[in-house]
Structure formats: C-alpha cells, structure tokens
Amino acid sequence: MTYIFRFLLLIFLMMPAGLSAQKVIRGTITDAETGEGLPNANILVEGTYRGTITNLDGEYTLTVPDIPATVLVRYIGYNSERREIRQNSDEKQDFALQPAIFDLGEVVVTGEDKAIRIMREVIRRKQIWRASLNTYRAEAYTRQRLANDTSIVSISESISEAFWDKEKGHREVVKSRRQTANIEGSDNFAGVSYLPNFYDDNLDIAGFDVVGVTNPKAFDYYDFKILSETRLDDKIVYEIGVSAKRKLQPTFEGTIFVLDEDFALLSVDLKPNDVVTFPVPIQDFDLSYEQQFNNFGGDYWLPVDVRINGTVRVGLIGLRFPPINFSQIARISNYQVNVPLPDSLYENYNTMRVDSVTIRSDSLFRKSVDVIPLSEIEVKAYETIDSTTTLEDAFRPTGFLARFIDFDDEDENNDGYTVGSGDNTTKPDSASTGKNDKKGSNIFKALRKGFKLDGRFNRVDLLYAGGRYNLYTKGQKVRFNIFGGYSFGYEEAGYGGSVSVWPLKGSSRLVLSAGYSAATDSRYKTTLYPEVLTSALNVLGVPDYHDYYRNEKITLAAGYRFRKPNMIGRIYLRSEEHSSIEYYSSYSPLALGLNRRPNPTIDEGYVRSVTLSLDNLSGDEKALGIIGNNSFILSAEFSDGALGSDYDFARFNLEVYRQFNTIFKRRLFPNTLDLRLMAGTSIGDLPYQRYGILDGTASYFTPFGSFRTQRNLPLEGEHYLGLVAEHNFRTVPFEILGLDILVDQGVGLVVFGGAGRTWIDEDRKQQFLDTNGYNLRQEDLIAEIGVSVNSIFSVFRVDLAQRLDEPGFFVGLSLARWF
C-alpha cells in the first residue's frame, strides 16, 4: 500500500530559503472594498528576484534584505500598491488593494483574430527571451497535502534550492523538510523539480506529453478566445479561454491571463482534457494547475508559484478506496539567472537529492519565514496527526475483496537472480529469506516464511500435492531449495532440490547452481500458460493443453548478468533420463464424463546436453497478454554420444517480444503495435520432447502470443516459424464515434493477426502415428486475422478470429491488455 501511494504522489508531481534577512514582515492582503483575503497575491521586493505569495486566506510572510527596500503587492484586477520598508517599520504590514476600474462584461470580438494575434505575439516574444535564458537557480518552498473524504491525512514540506539548465534540465537539492508524524522523511516528496512550467513548449503531466499553450505549434492544438479584459495598474490584462482543437490529443483547457504591451503570461488556470485518463484500477482522475509568472523588472518571465489540486478515485469490482485528494503549493523566489551551475548536480540522473548536512533537522523551518503560512486546518493537522494515523488506515478500501488484502507486509527487494534446474530466471523470493524484520524474528517464523505449498492438476498427475522450501544464508549469498510431493494419478513422487551461490563479493551478477529433480515434465515448453492457469482450466474440464513424461535430471549451471547491454548469459550442463507415462485420466471435478486424449509415449532414453542461452527476459512475457514488453531469448542445445547421450542433435530457438508506439504518442498509453516472433530449427535426431512449438489457445482462453484459431493444442515441429501481431487502438475508435459510455469505461479496440508454419519429417510423423494412434499437430501453414473488444469491465477482452488458410471462425476470451 505504501508503494501505491508513493506512485500516486509521483503521478501528481509534474527549494533554500533565505536566512540572511535584515527585516521580516508579515500580514494579510485583502480586497479594500470587501475585506476578504486575496489568495495567491504576489508580494515582491522591487529590484530583486525575491518575493512570495499569500495563502488561501491572504496571509503572507516575507524576508526583506538590504533595508530600506520597496515592497510591491500586485493582483490581477486590482491596483498594485508599493510601500517602503525601513528598519523601524512595523513587522505587521497589511495591504488593502483597490479594485481596478474595468468593464465586467464579456468583450465581443469578431472571430478569433484578436486572441490569435495576442497569442502569436506572446509566443514570438517568448522565443526571443527564452533563447538567451540558459540557466537559473532559485530558492523554493513546497507543501503537499494528502486527504481522504473526511480529513487531512498527511502534510509534507520542503525548503530547497532549484536549478535549471536549458540543455540538462532540472535538479533540486533539499535543504530542510518537515512532515506530519505519520510520514517518514524518506517518503517526503515535496519539491519543485517535478513541477511544470507553463511557459515550456511541452509539459509532462502525469506521464502525458502535453503541448503547452505557448508552443510554436499551439495553434494546431488549441482554440483561443478572448473572454474578458481587466487591468493590472495601467495595463490591460486579457482573459483568454483555451480549448482543445484536437480532441484526441492530450491538451489543456481553461483560462490564461496575458499582459498587454508586454505580451506575457501573467497566470494560467488550466486542467488536462478528458484524454488524460488512466486504466484500472484508477476510475477517476481530476487534476488542475494554477501558476503565476513575473519578470521581476527584467527580461525573463519566470514562475512565481505552482498550485496543483486533484482527486483520484481507485477501485476494482469488489474493492473501492476512499477518494485520494491531493494539493500542492510551491513558491519560487530569489532567482539567479544565467549563472554557472555546479557540475556535480548532473553527475547522476537523480533529479532531486538531499543535502546530507542540512537535512538532519527542520532547523531551516524554525529560522525561515519565507514559507507560505499554514492554514488553520493545517496547523491543527500537525497537532493531531500522530504516527498511528497511517496512510493504509486512512485509505483502507471497502468491498468483499478487502478482507483478502494484507496491508502490513512489505516485501524486500533483491537484485539477484538464480539459474537452477530449470530454464527460467527468477529473482530470489524475499518473502522466503527468513530475514529479521525491524522488531526481530525468531527462528520458527523464519522457517515458516520459507515454506510454500505446491500443487497442480492435470490428466497425468491428476492431483499433485506437495510443498517447497527456500532458505537463504545471511547476506543472501547462498540459496537452498528443496521440493517434494506426490502425484495421485500415475502414483509417483516428485522430489528434488538445488543450491545457488552468488560468489562475487558485493555483486549478484554471477550465480552458480546445481540441482537434482525427478518429476513430471511437459513435452513442450511455453511461456504463455503458467502451471497455475492450466491446472485451473483442467479442473474446469478444459482439454489438457500439455503432454507429459517423467524426467529425472541433474543440472549444473552458471549465469552472468551483463551491465551493457542489460542481458543474462547462461550455460547449462544436463543429464536427463526420460521415460513415458502411460497413465492418463479423464476425471475432472467440474466436468464429469469428459473424454480426454491419451498421453503419448516419447523417445525414451538419456539426453545429456550442453545449452547456451542469452536473454533479457523481464517476466512480463508471462503476464498473459496484459503487459507489452521488449524481450528476447536465444538458445542453443547440443547433445552428442560423446557425452553419453542416446541422441545426437543440435537445436536452436529464438523468441522475441517487441512493442512499438505508433500513433497518439503524446498520451501516457499511446497506440501500440505488439509482436511475438517464434523461430527454431534443428539438425540430427531430435526427440519428440525437444520439438519446438507455435502456441495455440487453451480452449477459449486466447492470450496475446497465441494463434487464436488453433484450439487446445500447439503446433509442433523440428523446424518452426511464426509471427503474431496486434495493434491496440485503445479507446480512440470509440472516441471518434462519440461513444462516451464506452470511453468512460476504458473499452478499446484491438486488431490482430498471425501467420506461421511448422515442419516435421514425414517418417517421424508416421513413427509417432504408429506408436500413439494419432498424428503430431503440424500444419503446412496457419494464418488468421481478427478483432478484439478490449477492457470489458476493465478486466476482460473478447477476441473474434477468422482463419484464412481454411474455413473457421472462433470466439475467445482473455485478460484485457492494459499496457
């Protein structure tokens, strides 16, 4: 849960205070006629880049250096007020601003010519002064507030120093931070380096690449319309409405205020359009931005503040969280423009870092007055929120699934990987390490954590029940794994174990492993269907996707993770004894009377081989088509009589996943083209249980990567080649058709297709037929196209596929493509 809220805070985010003040003033900025406080009013020290803004009640504090000085207070729609501050001036300095005289009525203009002329000049002038703005550094104060539907949950603040380089981007050094008692300092993300500058050409808003209102191409994306005119002192201020011209691109909508004669942005009040949405579990995302600018009497219009307010609603069927309300306010002041920046800032890619010398206490908060005053409810929150007011409790969900969520456990991460008796690469399971938690842990608890139940259901094992145990030594340099269980079908025990060692000090890049196992094995390997899925389908009476044999093997392996490029190389030495399993059962607890196909015999004997592989697998390729990824695995296996093997063969296999962004690339989730390439060949006497496959579907379950018109079985071959592809148009087709009811639910459209072929020697096919009574699944060619309705109830997709090489129309169901 903690990680969830960290993620949501980072979606919303898109700092040292002066300590050498000679004079501190504080007070309230009000409307002279009504007496009401003016929120976000600008208070500036003339002739400097120093200033601040008021809070929502119109209250402010400000450090005034170099007394005497003139303080300027300005607010759009009011006459500015100047006041000289001397050493003997009162600390309390209230300002009552007189409203400027202007016509409140809407300005009638013909067409959009005037607004376009104004914005064209704003953009032209921006390009001139931006060309000579190379760097700046500034002082910043930031406050973030998180609330549910009843109260404030947490407050976090920071005082920092912000840096910007035209070529290298933003950096920030946090000097001091303060937060409510329920937040750790490490979870305080308050800062300005992630915040937007609405004078930028493009803005990163919650992961969307949004065209700014002052982008040179803004007229291709926006319509501008003058709404009204007001004044700031003796100059006209135009209130200009902003609306999207391209309804399918992420843009802003709202209002901006432009100062006449200077043709500069004074402030913006914008929110992303409806294109800025997110998939499940986020059900509603409402975000708004306000920002003001000032040139401080110079050439450059720089941000004075950023104010963000938003609400996120998160939930799934059976699980609903309280609304997460987020607000952030930041004040940026005391700019130094076009000054050298320390090279050390850009030695790494971390945008924000902490000054280890000053961060140890909140002393700057105690000394500094250039923070935006807390409101009354924020002061009360600091007084009442203690360490027991956790985010987990404040946002605890309701619904029938809530009882199954554990809010207390947090997994620890480990960067190691294992190369064991199997071909898969896995990270060590931190939940099974037996490491002590913060309060200490007894031996029994550590042993209990390492144990996991193990089970499966298929027509050969019928029910396999057992367990496995992982144990790590201190420092996680050695891992022991043992497993055991019993197959109630063909009545054999499965058992084995392995040991993995990470021998390099301070590194997990090299791993050595040895293992032994005697257990049921599948005659063909697939990355599409995990065992837990096929077991569940078998229980439901779906035809068994796999064929099985008994495999007793000894494995020695080594793996190395390379830095550049990021991939893993492995070598396996295996000695395997393969034997057929003649038993099979048609029993299924939920499908009585099912007639399952027999389990075929195999080429029995010893297979002793050397396997080399190279891959960058991330695990996403096993995500049942939910997540697109870019990964590959290339392997080569060599078996020879010189190794004591009963078979002489060499086989080569390649599997590639690729995802390409195609159109609407400015969206967080652009339209994508996903590909899966499967290819393999062999020479020599390849046993049946080493054939390659093109995946079909597990009955009506049709995930990406499978041939959706090939039901219940894969296609096998000594040689094989296949390519499947799908283009995810997401909600765009329904947006074009104006079907908002589908768009609001995230329903999208996917077009897919595939083609492939396998080859088997005719004599080998006949030999298998003579032995088992039916032929191997092999096709000269398979080709198909289809369409999917994606994200039904945010969980499923319906696939409609047409076979091209022969008649056939198929309907399938799979999990929705989310990413």
Image (cartoon, rainbow, N blue to C red):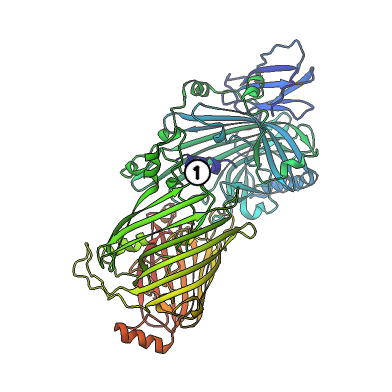
Q: Quadrant of residue 815?
A: bottom left
- Residue 105 lies left or right of residue 388; in this view the side is right
Q: Which of 350 and 614 is in front in this view?
A: 614
Q: Residue 368: where, in percent of width, then height? A: 66, 22
Residue lying farthest top?
A: 88
Point out the image quarter for the N terminus: top left
Asked if residue 736 shows in the view, the reply is no
Above-or-below relation of 537 to 141? below
SS for callout 1: loop
Asked if residue 311 shows in the view, the reply is yes
Q: Residue 40: where, in percent of width, then height? A: 62, 29
Above-or-below relation of 627 to 54? below
Amino acid type of the residue tagged 1 in the rendering? Lys
Q: Nearer the viewer, residue 228 or 21?
A: 21
Classed neighbour count for the residue bearing mark 1: other residues with Cα under 10 Å, few (<14), some (14–19), many (≥20): few
**Total number of numbered discs in the rendering:** 1
Q: Label 1, on which residue? A: 474
Above-or-below relation of 799 to 430? below
Residue lying farthest left?
A: 593
- Residue 89 lies left or right of residue 709; in this view the side is right
Q: Quadrant of residue 462?
A: bottom left
Residue at screen point 73% across, 12% down: 89
Above-or-below relation of 307 to 747? above
Q: Residue 148: where, in percent of width, then height? A: 44, 33
Residue at screen point 50% across, 33% down: 146
Q: Residue 660: where, in percent of width, then height? A: 57, 64
Q: Nearer the viewer, residue 52 or 387?
A: 387
